[in-house]
Image (cartoon, rainbow, N blue to C red):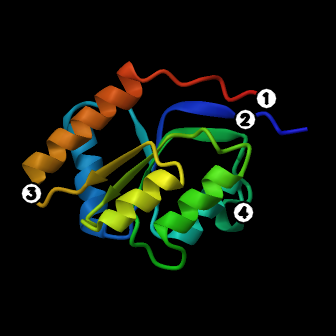
Amino acid sequence: MMQSVTVKKNLILLVEDNPTDELLTIEALKEHHMPVEVIVARNGAEALDYIFGTGKYADRNCIELPSFILLDLKLPKISGLSVLKKIRSDDRTRIVPVVILTSSKEEQDMVESYSLGANSYIQKPVNYQEFSVIAEQLGIYWFTLNQLPRYDS
């Protein structure tokens, strides 16, 4: 029997190895008064540890999942695509929304992301103003407009 899980409203797991992009994302969300808590994982292994309650997150209540995951593709230790594949292969995490937020312009990365079950693919803009607009739109969509199912099994 599958373990029951719940979503923690307004929690984002940001998987980002670039400190500048991490700061830009968090600042842009704050600038638009998004009522969110952001957990940051700086590589693919740390992201999986957080999601599945292993490693340094072994004490975390892994029954509680983020509202959505912002996932970079080019990560140290374990790639973003491998993280996505693992998320989608587990019954507990399969339906957690995953938004790819990456600097990759590679068509193959986009195709593979969607093939593995990404909910959205966004190329990171290079300037703060554009980044800020994207963060605002992400917040409005995922926390206001989008409806998530109950995660109970």
Quote the CA–CA distance across marks 1 and 2. Answer: 7 Å
Of callouts 1 and 3, the N-terminal one: 3
Q: Report how far apart the C-alphas of labels 2 and 3 lie in the structure.
A: 37 Å
Q: Is residue 24 left or right of residue 153?
A: left
Q: What residue type is labelled 3?
A: Asn
Q: Name the residue under label 1.
A: 153
Which of the two residues, 8 or 112, is positioned nearer the viewer here?
112
In what element is the residue under mark 2? Answer: loop
Sequence order check, earlier mark of 4 and 2: 2
Q: Which mark is residue 114?
A: none
| Mark 2: amino acid | Val
Residue at the spot 27% in from the left edge and 40% down from the top edge: 29
Q: In which quarter of the image is the C terminus?
A: top right
Mark 1 vs mark 2: give the one in front: 1
For mark 1, does the 10 Å Cα neighbourhood hold few (<14), some (14 to 19), or many (20 or more) residues? few
Q: Can residue 15 be seen in this view?
A: no
Asked whether disc 4 touches disc 2, contact meaning CB atoms under 8 Å apart, the reply is no
Q: Is residue 8 left or right of residue 4?
A: left
Secondary structure, mark 4, is loop
Which of discs 3 and 4 lies nearer the camera? The answer is 3
Which residue was labeled with disc 4? 54
Q: What element carries label 1?
A: loop
Contact, mark 3 vs mark 4 (Cβ under 8 Å)? no
For the residue pair 131 and 29, the one nearer the viewer reads as 131
Would you identify the image quadrant in which residue 8 lies?
A: top right
List the residue tagged with mark 2.
5
**What secondary structure is found at the residue carrying circle 3?**
loop
